[in-house]
Image: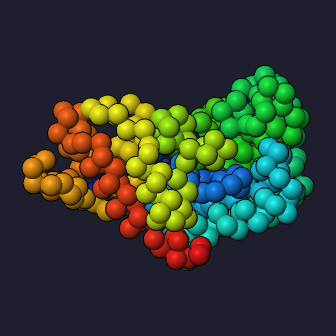
Amino acid sequence: MERLELVIRNAEEVVTLDELKALMEAKERPRGYVGYEPSGKVHMGHMLTANKLIDLQAAGFQVVVLLADLHAYLNEKGTLEEVRATADYNRDCFIALGLDPEKTEFVYGTDYQLEPEYVKNVLKMARNTTLNRARRSMDEVGRNMDNPHVSQMIYPLMQAVDIAALRVDLAVGGIDQRKIHMLAREEMPKLGLQPPVCLHTPIISGLNGGKMSSSKGNYISVDDSAEDLEKKIISAYCPAKDIEGNPVTELFKYHILPRLGAVTIRRPEKFGGDVTYDKYEALEADYLAGKMHPLDLKKSAVEHLNAILEPVREKMG
């Protein structure tokens, strides 16, 4: 797979593709980052951006992971001590998922976000940003946004300044981070800071077909036991001949096939026998045509996802 193709595979959007191409031509090792708010279990949604960081490492990027403990505190996710402990757990999960600890720069927000220069830049950005703009930026990621705290309005400004403080060329996040990234691209130049290229991954569906969220309990954790994983996938929403909001087909698209390269779905001979796919598009076409039964797909998802997550269980157990 070509370098650019590897960087953009399974991306929802790149802002902008031309800027990304120019960046990759200009720099031998650009810096790409994801900021993770430590707020609970690491699930398949987080793993989507972790997969992208692994792609970036393979494409020659220097990868930075921000364990945003101070962000989590401002967004009402616990005390500083609680979110720091969750951040440590997150770090171990990401390493177990395949991020090379020797090639990954793990940074805690509290390591630098209280420094005078950082705080000054946040305050400068606050002077240029309306309250409505800050609130809109937080709509997708904030807690209790019907009655937000002032701390949550600071959150997106800090995220923009993080990009400068960490010397980031490429900011990676779920598509729910888009408004914050666009705020960064517009406001950073006003402070004399270089705005990032942005790459957004999709929002993966939860087991019930809605947005996957640890607060809703409709998720697969990367350290779920094999038994729990099987129960969750076998009972998951998976309508026949339909991929819209289908978490099982998305597991193959975003996690299983990118990780394994090819999969064999085992079926009795009377139902067509085993079939092997090395491209998601072929699997999707068969599923939409009714050539693949949802239960066969679910059983295969259990088998292959268990193989992917076993190293995480071993490390975290």
Side of 21 relative to 95 (left or right): left
Q: Quadrant of the C terminus?
A: bottom right
Residue at the image point whose x is 32% and y is 31% from the top? 242
Q: Find residue 10 and report its horizontal and vertical position in percent.
A: 39, 45
Please tell me whether residue 173 is drawn above or below residue 168 in the rendered image.
Answer: above
Name the residue at the top extreme. 132
Residue 230 visible, this orientation: yes
Q: Quarter-wise, where is residue 186 in the image?
A: top right
Count of numbered labels shown in the rendering: 0
Residue at the image point whose x is 60% and y is 57% from the top? 42
The foreground one among 140 and 42 is: 42
The foreground one among 236 and 128 is: 236
Please tell me whether residue 210 is drawn above or below residue 316 in the rendered image.
Answer: above
Residue at the image point whose x is 58% and y is 66% from the top? 93
Residue 187 visible, this orientation: no
Side of 66 relative to 21 (left or right): right
Side of 31 relative to 165 (left or right): left
Please tell me whether residue 40 is drawn above or below residue 235 in the rendered image.
Answer: below
Colour style of the rendered protein structure:
rainbow
Q: Quadrant of the N terminus?
A: bottom left
Please tell me whether residue 12 is drawn above or below residue 47 in the rendered image.
Answer: above
Q: Find residue 287 and report its horizontal and vertical position in percent.
A: 24, 38
Residue at the image point whose x is 89% and y is 35% from the top? 150
Side of 99 relative to 240 (left or right): right
Q: Find residue 69 and report its horizontal and vertical position in percent.
A: 77, 57
